[in-house]
Image (cartoon, rainbow, N blue to C red):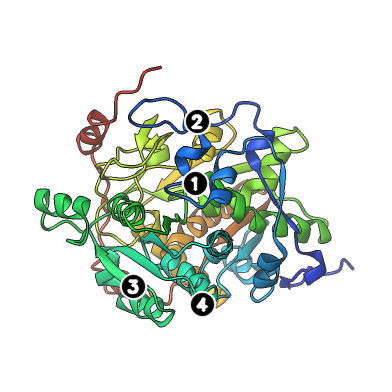
């Protein structure tokens, strides 16, 4: 009789990766360079120093170093909550009556309730090592802000967080947790910055966006001596740090003599997805294997599935460098739905390039279908997922149902990025049938496309 795969598999501390994997090193065609918005020339390293820590700036522009050592201090911090478990969803498989094997990598075992701490500790560590006085950042659903507050508290670094106003109002206890770790939390857009005041003057009732919050955080960092800005997604450096997720997943699956036919992750800015798929995408790029890789985004903010592949600002205030990515336009204001941290107008340049070159797929899903999947998953697997994570769950369920219909016993791996215990307003909306689906029209999206910056070829 075949030995049953355990429900949960944890690596030992000795088995944890000691290096991050830089996916760009194995891309034959690299992501397009960041551009100085004034000169439209590729950014030089020194131009990033006023915004980012020096070591993080180097990681941002490094296209060639395949593996980067994880400093011992960060490894020790990781050991407080890592390795995270790889879990076989036996009960979900049974409920779906599918021949598919469903695995998920659970990243919710820390106070932030998400994968975000993997990069937060790295960015805080490098800031402290450089001798900076403090940091600024933005947060959408609040997971990144919480994670960075944890990390900055550990390294005794002051932190100012600009939280997207709609999430600030929907999730007041996220603010409380950040303040527990000594962070200063400001609803964005705010009247504390020039760009915030300008956005409010133009649209006083706006619920804000990640683009708005980024603008405010960058302005605060660049006008405060000894401060730098840090970002929880999109950037190359963040995808690099999050590769710990995929590296652990691959090691665990090898221990089980398994390999995924399909890898699925939710997609907003791209950090969790990029981290999860990193070693499996490496196999695709080096032609060692060919797993299907699926990015799942909200239908209300569909940058990959309906966006333009073009240079755009990473923020609404148009103060950041230009990145070539799939974008809805930096002026796009997502609806105040419950997609949380996935409400960003653009996608990671790395993932955008991989998608553009046909190495991965993308799909978008409406939020009622997302929460239908979240409730089913919670009942079968006992974990209440974050709305962001539930986007991946939705597509994993759909793929498992397809396996039932075709009789194919595929192996599915998805990322469970975090827990939904601060998202009860959203769950309540779904359960009392007041949740509505919003899908922007082509006319809505065209407004953002029309204002994309003009960039010379």
- For the N terminus, the quadrant is bottom right
Residue on which disc 2 sits: 33
Q: Between disc 2 and disc 1, whose residue precedes?
A: 2
Which residue carries the number 1 mark? Answer: 235
Residue bearing the label numbered 3: 184
Viewer-nearest residue: 361 or 112: 112
Left or right of residue 133, residue 383 in this image? right
Which-is-in-front pick, marks 2 and 4?
Answer: 2
Residue depicted at 20% across the width and 61% down the height = 190
Residue under pointer 4:
111
Q: Which residue is rendered at x = 43% and y = 56% of the image?
A: 228
Q: Residue furthest right?
A: 1
Query: Disc 1 and disc 4: Cα gap in Å?
Result: 23 Å
Q: Earlier in the sequence, mark 3 or mark 4?
A: 4
Give neighbour class at mark 1: few <14, some 14-19, many 20+ (Cα, 10 Å): many
CB within 8 Å, label 2 to label 3: no
Viewed as shown, does residue 295 lie left or right of 283? Answer: left
Residue 115 place in picture, x, y as percent: 55, 64
């Amino acid at each position: 009789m075949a030995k049953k795969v355990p429900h949960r598999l944890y690596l030992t501390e000795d088995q944890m990766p000691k290096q991050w994997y830089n996916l760009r090193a194995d891309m034959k065609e690299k992501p397009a360079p960041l551009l100085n918005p004034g000169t439209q020339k590729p950014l030089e390293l020194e131009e990033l120093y006023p915004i980012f820590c020096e070591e993080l700036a180097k990681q941002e522009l490094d296209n060639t170093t395949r593996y980067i050592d994880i400093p011992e201090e960060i490894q020790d911090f990781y050991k407080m909550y890592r390795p995270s478990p790889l879990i076989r969803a036996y009960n979900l498989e049974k409920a779906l009556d599918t021949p598919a094997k469903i695995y998920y990598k659970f990243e919710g075992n820390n106070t932030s309730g998400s994968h975000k701490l993997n990069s937060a500790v790295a960015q805080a560590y490098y800031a402290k090592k450089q001798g900076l006085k403090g940091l600024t950042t933005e947060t959408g659903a609040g997971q990144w802000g919480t994670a960075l507050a944890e990390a900055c508290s550990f390294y005794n670094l002051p932190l100012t967080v600009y939280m997207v106003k709609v999430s600030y109002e929907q999730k007041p206890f996220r603010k409380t947790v950040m303040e527990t770790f000594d962070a200063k939390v400001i609803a964005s857009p705010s009247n504390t910055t020039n760009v915030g005041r300008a956005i409010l003057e133009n649209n006083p009732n706006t619920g804000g966006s990640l683009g708005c919050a980024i603008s405010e955080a960058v302005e605060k960092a660049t006008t405060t001596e000894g401060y730098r800005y840090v970002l929880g997604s999109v950037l190359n450096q963040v995808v690099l740090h999050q590769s710990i997720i995929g590296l652990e997943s691959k090691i665990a699956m090898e221990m089980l003599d398994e390999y995924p036919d399909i890898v699925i992750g939710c997609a907003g800015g791209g950090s969790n997805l990029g981290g999860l798929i990193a070693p499996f995408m490496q196999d695709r790029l080096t032609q060692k294997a060919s797993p299907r890789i699926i990015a799942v985004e909200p239908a209300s903010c569909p940058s990959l599935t309906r966006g333009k592949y073009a240079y755009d600002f990473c923020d609404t205030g148009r103060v950041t460098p230009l990145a070539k990515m799939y974008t809805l336009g930096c002026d796009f204001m997502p609806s105040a739905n419950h997609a949380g941290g996935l409400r960003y107008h653009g996608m990671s340049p790395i993932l955008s390039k991989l998608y553009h070159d046909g190495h991965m797929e993308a799909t978008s899903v409406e939020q009622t279908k997302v929460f239908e999947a979240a409730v089913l998953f919670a009942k079968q697997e006992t974990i209440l997922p974050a709305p962001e994570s539930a986007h991946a769950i939705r597509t994993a369920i759909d793929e498992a149902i397809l396996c039932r219909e075709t009789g194919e016993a595929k192996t599915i791996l998805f990322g469970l990025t975090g827990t939904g215990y601060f998202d009860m307003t959203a769950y309540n909306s779904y359960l009392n049938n007041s949740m509505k689906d919003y899908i922007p029209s082509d006319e809505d999206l065209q407004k953002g496309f029309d204002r994309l910056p003009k960039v010379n070829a």
